[in-house]
Amino acid sequence: MLLSKEQLSSVMAKHSERENGLHDLMEIMLESMMLAERREFLDQSKGNKGNGYRQGRSFGHGRVLEFRIPRDRYGNFHPKILALLRDQELECERLAGSLYCRGLTQGQVGEIFGEIYGEHYSKASISRMIDYLRSDVQEWLNRPLEGYYPIVLVDAIHIKIHRKRSVATEAFYVVLGVKEDKKREVLGIYNRPTESAAGWEDIFRDVQSRGAGHIGLLVSDGLTGLDSALSVVYPKTLLQRCVTHLKRNMLSKVRHGDKMELAEDLREVFRTGQKDYTKCEAWQNWTALCQKWGKDYRSIKRMGEDISYKYYFTYLQFHPRIQSMVYTTNWIERLNKDFRRVLKMRGAMPNEESVLVLIGKVAMDKDAYNRELPGIDRDKTLFPGE
């Protein structure tokens, strides 16, 4: 029986007055639209018939909608309205992922969705909603790389995670590359609970296997085993240890009253931007500094006797205008601040994967890396051009 427009309006008005009546009407309308579409589809499909229903659900205003989706015998019928509902569901998933990556926990995201859609969302359900985010980040972290990176920086961020019923602070190493077009990109993020040459060799092998055949200069802190692993995987790559980390370390070894004088002496040793300041002169100044301060601080005296400290002066063989850019890992430290901003609302992270998803997404969306670094290509040994 067909109802007139007035009769239909009356039925809808009465139904909408009930508790949850509006949502019941929406479910009825969705099912009716799909049934009408199936009738038209079957009229044009000889030998085909209706074949019952399957359950469907989508997000509504204040509640999750549940409805029956009509099927056909051959499985060829796909209601067009479902495509629109899937688009809406995809937007909801992306909203959940966006909130999660801005520092909210899965429980907090569930509470917000409960307020919007009128239904409690467990951590497990929110976790399923952001599955797309995990796959996107994983795919991005495993993407092919460029063949040559003039400069690569490596630094660590330390994060508390659960592992085997206990919580411990573990290092996540961030590998940041400067491309030939003077833009930057994160090449990889790796969790290594302990530092070792074997661990670093695994990291460099991964970067190499994804296409990065050559690296001009690698800048890092004095990480255990890194230099020996670098010589195995990238034997032609120059190594620069982070001067900023060294200065902090040395200043932590002296009394408060000596810090200002030592800082001034360190500035004199690690000069930048002077064309006539050579590695040889800098090394002489370094040994003199260690002798001076070694009289009162034995740990500083030992530094002057360690030949591996030569890696702190590699920057002096490059163009004076870029020396201050390549003798520190400050670019990664700024990125680490963005990571901490996302992590600070949480306690210990539940596992390694959850950390990689969060900080990987931050790295993916780092807009600043799309801007060119002015003047970085002045040094033609690192940026030979065409």
Image (cartoon, rainbow, N blue to C red):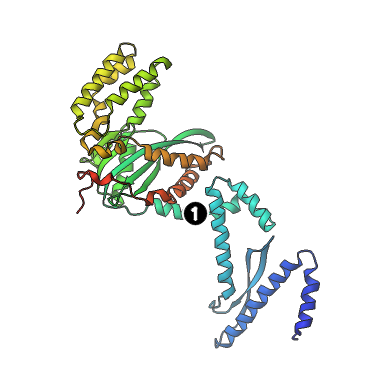
Q: Position of residue 110 (x, y in %)?
A: 63, 51
Q: Amino acid at mark 1?
A: Leu
Depth check, front residue: 244 or 119: 244
Depth check, front residue: 26 or 338: 338
Q: Position of residue 334 (x, y in %)?
A: 42, 40
Instruction: State the residue at coordinates (40%, 21%).
Output: 252
Q: Is residue 210 above or below residue 319?
A: below
Q: Is residue 142 above or below residue 38?
A: above
Residue 366 in sight in this render: yes
Instruction: State the residue at coordinates (71%, 67%).
Output: 23
Q: Which residue is mark 1?
A: 133
Depth check, front residue: 260 or 296: 260
Quadrant in the rendering for residue 136: bottom left
* The C terminus: image quadrant: bottom left
Instruction: State the residue at coordinates (59%, 68%).
Output: 85
* The N terminus: image quadrant: bottom right
Instruction: State the residue at coordinates (41%, 54%).
Output: 139
Which type of secondary structure does the marked residue at label 1 adopt?
helix
